[in-house]
Amino acid sequence: MSWPAGARELVLVQQQEIEELRAQLTALATELASLRERIGRTSRNSSKPPSSDGPGFKPPERRKGSDRKRGGQQGHPGAGPELLPIERVDEVVEHHPAACRRCGQLLQGEDPEPLRHQVIEIPPITPLVIEHRLHRLVCPCCSTSTCAALPADVEASRYGPRLSALVGLLGSAFPLSFSKTQALLDQLLGVEISRGAIAAIRRRLSAALELPMAEALQAARQQPVAYVDETGAPTGNADGNNPDRRRGWQWVMVTPVVTVFLQSLNRSAAAAIELLGDAFGGILVSDRFSAYNYLSTQQRQLCWAHLIRDLNAIAERTGVSGEFAVELLGLQQQLFAQWHQWKKGTIDWPQLQQRCQPIRQSFETTLQRAVDLGCERKERTPWAKTVRTCQQLLQRNQALWTFLERPGVEPTNNAAERALRQSVIQRKISHGVQSAGGAICRSRLLTVTITLRQQGRDVWPFLEQVWISHHRGGVMPSLLPDS
């Protein structure tokens, strides 16, 4: 068959155009799938907080509850307000009936067990203001003037230890902005204080917390298990320590003893080592962030909560990706059904390990099947992303199952995420800090607040004692629990 003049060249050009259009179509389809996945991100399939889901989001259906009405049920003994002990009662007012309510006979005497009704009230709060007058006298012999000095137990600043500790408390346990801290102190205590004074008090309190913070950090690094996470923490350049205007990150390490916060300008392995130390020998529970990869898999427990969100995202993809994710999610549900039975005491530790062994093998086999199907690593299709996720999990497969081999290790780092909520709330209120000193202050106050709450101790008296010990001398209180 003979081709007309120029026909062969035309066919070749058209074939080339078809290939180019096909490549463009594939690229656009991949981009569309990526955009749809990004738009569909929720707290269920990503690390987004539930507050960002929006009004149109429908959470997964929960099991149907009982038909009982809300509140206390029939026969419930109740838990009303308890009476305070008599030692805390400031005034007792006796009330006697004057006459019988039936016949009118006058009544006298005392009831050995009268009904007790207590009314708790707040008296008007006024600050205690003590004025110290330092007299300057002239010597009659040499005409030298000498001024009296403040006693060692008198605060050199304008604000006393308890008020200064309250200013720190309102910036940590009760994360108020500077303006709201001003308003509260003015309306509740009648104390007028400037924003500069608030900042100065918190700087001094931060300096006073240096030793307790160092002691807590050292103790945390020696614990057998630590739960770690990080979140964004904007840091300004008011002091010139952040000229590149880097975002800043708040890191947290939760241990059974203390919870420690550190703020860094980096989200890297160097920042992780700054928190954990060079010789950390415990088990680290975290997400799959690469900053922790310098530790061996024998020291890692990857967070299953993060993994479940990733699997939910994969399950929403079309085709083989969704099928693999649904299979893995089913195995995950079986795994945690056994874990919760052990938590409740239904099964013992050897039974838990025995029952989870086939689940683990099936999970690993499913990951390997996805990898064996393979794809080009440079591809950006949803399937390629699924395979890469499975490859990453297989590379650190040992770190998925540490909680089944080491008692006392949880399968998630939810404890660290809960601890970071306080930092996130402060970030949303104040939009970050303006200097490195402010970052240090916030980290130290967060460490004190969360650690003492973890131990069931009061923050306000602790901060007061820290202030007194640092500025007047004395025994510095410790963030470590009493042995």
Image: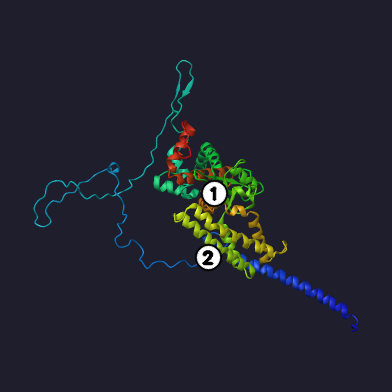
Indicate whether 474 appears above or below 316: above
In the rendered structure, the answer to whether residue 352 lies left or right of residue 13 reads: left
Q: Residue at x 44, y 55 (%)?
A: 344
Reply above or below: 212 against 76.
Answer: above
Q: Where does the C terminus fall, quadrant-wise?
A: top left
Three-letter code, disc 1: Arg
- Say above or below: 238 vs 144: below
Quadrant assignment for the N terminus: bottom right
Task: Quickly name the residue at label 1.
Answer: 406
Residue 388 figure quarter: bottom right
Q: Choose between 405 and 97: the one closer to the eye.
A: 405
Residue type, label 2:
Gly
Residue 179: image tag? none
Please name whichever residue, 211 or 158, is drawn nearer the observer in this view of the structure. Answer: 211
Secondary structure of the residue carrying tag 2 is loop
Query: Badge 2: how crowded within 10 Å, few (<14), some, or many (20+)?
Result: few
For residue 219, say whether it is visible: yes
With 390 as the anchor, is 227 left or right in this view?
A: left
Of the residues tagged 2 and 1, which is closer to the observer? 1
* Between discs 2 and 1, the one toward the N terminus: 2
Colouring of the image = rainbow
Q: Position of residue 189 (x, y in %)?
A: 40, 45
Point out residue 162 in the picture as x, y percentages from the top left corner. Answer: 43, 39
Can residue 267 be seen at all in this image of the molecule?
no
Q: Is residue 209 left or right of residue 270?
A: left
Q: Which residue is mark 2?
A: 54
- SS of the residue under disc 1: loop
Report the Cα–Cα distance between label 2 and label 1.
Answer: 39 Å
